[in-house]
Image (tube, grey):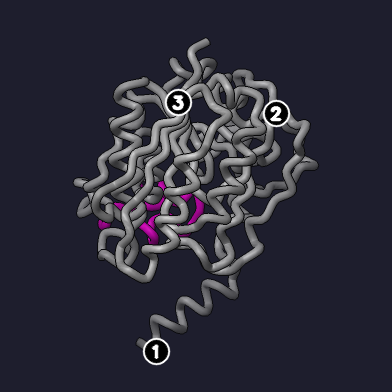
């Protein structure tokens, strides 16, 4: 089996980057895997020192088959950096595993990703594979993997054919704005998704991931998840681009967990349970309504 290249995007968080790399080095297939690291240039002098510290660290990384460091000469921003870096790499290798600089992986993360990339390559139902798993009711009968409508950007993989189907300009946005059926279809992956896409199109956020998630809905496709999370996000400490301070998405990694990839169907009970966990609480909805009223 030809292993998928790993692409890691870093910026100005030395401690987070180190945790991410060290967990990845402990993965079973690390020494057989190619690692590409994209380091974005400093946006301003306020982050110059931290960006330089990250760059000094990534220059010394080993423990992989090969390490290629790409240092941006200008500031791309997170969304543009990921879109550009993933496009270049996946077009060359045909498949890809993607991480950002605040993701701790369990030891069999790379094995799961590579196994799933091989198993589901010809299954057009599956648009991407996630290493992070949303909380759901584990009392529901389940396999080692499950399918869900929404994608996750916290440790994921895909194939070149799927990636190149993504319309990052969202050319059908005007139609989507007036089509409630398509909006509801998109929101099966979480009832906040259409609102987030609207914020993206208004320039209020800069998210590649919401457009990635919309591509799943647009192409009638799903994301494959392990039943236990193999990724823990340590970026909810107010240090990241879009993540504030929160423990809502924290998980405990099972370091011995190695899910068996198999052919499965959409489990409606799991879908419903994940949706329940993702969707806004009534209190959050009321707060949003109040903010709209008092504007």
Residue sitting at 30 percent across and 67 percent down? 44
In the rendered structure, the answer to whether residue 295 lies left or right of residue 248 reads: left
Task: Determine if the magenta segment contains residue 208.
Answer: no
Q: Which residue, as the protein is rendered here, is positioned at the far top? A: 1
For disc 2, the marked residue is 144
For disc 1, the marked residue is 294
Residue sitting at 36 percent across and 53 percent down? 78
Asked if the residues shown at circle 3 and circle 1 are in contact, with their CB atoms under 8 angstroms apart, the answer is no
Asked if the residues shown at circle 2 and circle 3 are in contact, with their CB atoms under 8 angstroms apart, the answer is no
Residue 107 in view, yes or no:
yes
Q: Residues within 10 Å of mark 1 (few under 14, many from 20)?
A: few
Real-space CA distance between mark 3 and mark 1, rounded to the nearest whole angstrom: 49 Å
Dot in front, 1 or 2: 2
Disc 1, SS: helix
Disc 2, SS: loop
Q: Which badge, 2 or 3, is on the more N-terminal residue? A: 3
Q: Residues within 10 Å of mark 3 (few under 14, many from 20)?
A: many
Disc 3, SS: loop
For disc 3, the marked residue is 5
In the rendered structure, the answer to whether residue 264 lies left or right of residue 6 reads: right
The picture quadrant where one finds residue 220 is top left
Residue 74 position in % (x across, y down): 24, 53
Given residues 203 and 142, the one toward you in this image is 203
Residue 185 in view, yes or no:
no
Q: Which badge, 3 or 1, is on the more N-terminal residue? A: 3
For residue 112, above or below residue 184: above
Residue sitting at 41 percent across and 63 percent down? 49
Q: Which residues are magenta?
A: 177-197
Real-space CA distance between mark 1 and mark 2, rounded to the nearest whole angstrom: 47 Å
Residue sitting at 48 percent across and 46 percent down? 100
């Amino acid at each position: 089996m030809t292993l998928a290249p790993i692409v890691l995007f870093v910026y100005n968080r030395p401690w987070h980057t180190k945790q991410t790399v060290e967990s990845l080095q402990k993965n079973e297939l690390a020494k057989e895997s190619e690692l590409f690291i994209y380091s974005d240039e400093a946006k301003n002098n306020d982050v110059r020192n931290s960006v330089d510290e990250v760059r000094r660290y990534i220059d010394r990384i080993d423990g992989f088959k090969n390490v290629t460091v790409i240092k941006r000469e200008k500031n791309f921003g997170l969304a543009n950096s990921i879109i550009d870096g993933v496009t270049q790499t996946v077009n060359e290798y045909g498949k890809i595993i993607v991480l950002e600089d605040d993701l701790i992986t369990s030891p069999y993360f790379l094995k799961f990703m590579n196994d799933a990339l091989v198993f589901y390559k010809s299954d057009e139902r599956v648009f991407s594979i996630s290493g992070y798993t949303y909380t759901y009711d584990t009392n529901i009968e389940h396999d080692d993997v499950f399918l869900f409508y929404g994608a996750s950007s916290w440790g994921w993989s895909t194939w070149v054919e799927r990636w190149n189907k993504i319309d990052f300009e969202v050319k059908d946005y005007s139609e989507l704005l007036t089509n409630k059926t398509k909006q509801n279809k998109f929101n099966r992956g979480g009832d906040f998704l259409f609102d987030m896409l609207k914020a993206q199109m208004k320039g209020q956020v800069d998210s590649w991931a919401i457009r990635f998630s919309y591509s799943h809905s647009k192409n009638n496709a799903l994301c494959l998840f392990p039943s236990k999370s193999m990724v823990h996000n340590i970026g909810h400490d107010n240090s990241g681009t879009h993540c504030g301070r929160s423990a809502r998405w924290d998980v405990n990694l099972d370091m011995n967990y190695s899910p068996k990839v198999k052919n499965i169907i959409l489990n409606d009970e799991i879908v419903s349970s994940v949706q329940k966990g993702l969707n806004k609480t009534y209190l959050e909805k009321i707060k949003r309504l109040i903010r709209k009223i008092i504007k």
